[in-house]
Image (cartoon, grey):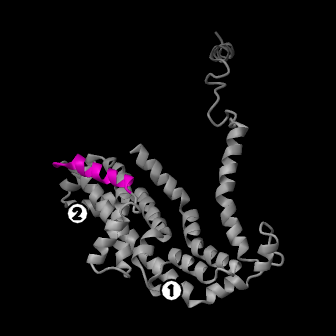
Amino acid sequence: MSATTARSWFSTAAGPNGPSGRRTGRDAPQKWGSPFTYFVALLFIGVCIAPVIYIVLGGFRTNSQITTSPAGLPHPWITANYVNVLKSTRFWGEFANSVLVALASTVGIVVLGLMVSFVIARYDFKLKGAMYSLFAAGLMFPMVIAITPLYIVIKDLGLVDNLLGVIVPQIAFGLPTTVIILVPFLRAIPNEIEEAAAIDGTSRLGFFVRMVIPLSLPGVVTVGILAFIGSWNNYVLPLYILNSQANFTLPLGVQAFSSQYSTDTAKVLAFTSLAMLPALVFFSIFEKRIVGGLTGAVKG
């Protein structure tokens, strides 16, 4: 059999999907979902985005424009509402309080959650399963349910009208989510790496700092972002704990500002837009990090 005849016979026997005509995944035509699925998805997106767009655009309008045409576009565009809010010391004071509370809560949640998750994931001890179940059960009890006994405890500690009275409970209620996400990451680290580090003379603390934290960085970033956004948007706890306006965070400041300027709707919308802008920008920048971290937790 000649070489040409052999190649011809091999191509015919292999068929269009054989070695000579194999279709890879990249060559396969892309399948689109049902139009109804896209319609429902766009409908949900519109329901979520429409209020945000209305609030942002409302800050560029006057009260007369809002009264005359509530759903209309600004005409002309007014920037005075945003400028007045940005010039007020009240806004920047509440902004600083929110940043302080969010950063302190995030650091506490990430550090303590990583340490607890490391112990649960890497060591065997009595009541290990009970401890993990306790953190998992914490997901079923939101802060709203425990707000009354929590307020009594904070009052007994003398932390009422104190930012620490907001930071400490936020750390406690943020730990369950952090542990549930980080434990799979830490369990996925091969034992051989820890054994090799021990042979090289690395202590447990050194292994934790040098190996565990870098390898679990996607999960750490994810829980950090979730903790920051959750702290920034928290309204119920500051409402119960903080009394003086000097200690208000932005969510509580929006409510107080709305009550004070209830007749100036455009200014209230401008204040609300600026209050929610940092969380929106922060979430938009790190959205892929959150999805990647959650995906890794599920796979782990």
Identity, as a three-letter code, of the amino acid under mark 2 = Leu
Instruction: Point out the tag, 1 or 2, that comes first from the N-terminus.
Output: 1
For mark 2, give the secondary structure: helix
Distance from Cα at disc 1 to Cα at disc 2: 39 Å
> Around disc 1, counting alpha carbons within 10 Å, would you say few (fewer than 14), some (14 to 19), or many (20 or more)?
some
Identity, as a three-letter code, of the amino acid under mark 1 = Gly
| Farthest left residue in view | 126
- Compared to residue 150, the image places residue 37 above or below, namely above
Residue 206 x, y percent position in the rendering = 24, 63
Residue 203 in view (yes/no): yes
Position of the N terminus, as image quadrant, is top right
Residue 182 in view (yes/no): no
The answer to which of 165 and 276 lies nearer the viewer is 165
The magenta stretch spans residue 129: yes
Residue 171 x, y percent position in the rendering = 35, 67
* Residue depicted at x 66% and y 60%: 49
Residue 40 x, y percent position in the rendering = 68, 44
Q: State which region is magenta.
A: 125-141
Q: Tell me: 38 left or right of 126.
A: right
Q: In the rendered image, which residue does mark 1 sit on?
A: 93
| Farthest top residue in view | 1
The magenta stretch spans residue 110: no
SS majority, magenta: helix
Locate residue 144: give its quadrant: bottom left
Q: Evaluate if marks 1 and 2 touch, with contact meaning CB atoms under 8 Å apart.
A: no
Q: Tell me: 242 left or right of 53.
A: left
> Around disc 2, counting alpha carbons within 10 Å, would you say few (fewer than 14), some (14 to 19), or many (20 or more)?
few
* Residue depicted at x 67% and y 33%: 28
The image's mark for residue 205 is 2
Position of the C terminus, as image quadrant, is top left
Q: Mark 1 or mark 2: which is in front?
A: 1
The answer to which of 96 and 241 lies nearer the viewer is 241
